[in-house]
Image (cartoon, rainbow, N blue to C red):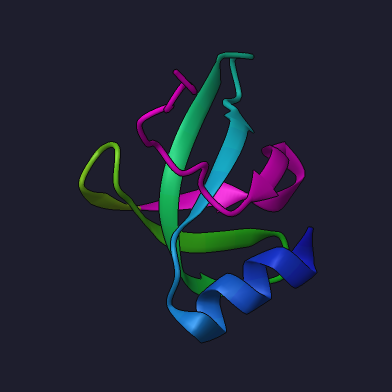
Amino acid sequence: MRGILHRAMLQHTPIEIIYMSQNGILTQRHIKVLEINEGTIKAFCLLRNKKRTFKIDSILSAAAPKKKGVVKFAN
């Protein structure tokens, strides 16, 4: 997990995370990692358009965002 977060920060690329809040609500977020600390990261959340702090232990998954596109079917 930390490797993905660190790489995203160094490359200034957004990542997609699944995050569980303190009250157990799951959200899917697209973020740009700004800083990695002992147990948290500071990131710009593209969903909320604000800087946010996320607990690393509450990030359930992190990956490059899925590309959205048009599916082409053969004729």
Res. 3 image quadrant: bottom right
Which residue ends up furthest to the front in the rendered image? 75
- Residue 18: x and y, percent? 61, 33
Q: Magenta includes 71?
A: yes
- Residue 42: x and y, percent? 47, 63
User: Which residue sits at x=50%, y=82%?
Assistant: 11
| Vertical arrangement, residue 7 with respect to residue 1, above or below | below
Q: Is residue 59 left or right of residue 34?
A: right
| Vertical arrangement, residue 65 with respect to residue 73, above or below | below
Q: Magenta includes 5?
A: no
| Magenta region, residue range | 52-75
User: Which residue sits at x=42%, y=45%?
Assistant: 30
In this view, the residue in front, 53 or 46, is 46
Q: Quadrant of the N terminus?
A: bottom right
User: Which residue sits at x=62%, y=59%?
Assistant: 40
Q: Is residue 12 left or right of residue 66?
A: left
Q: Quadrant of the C terminus?
A: top left
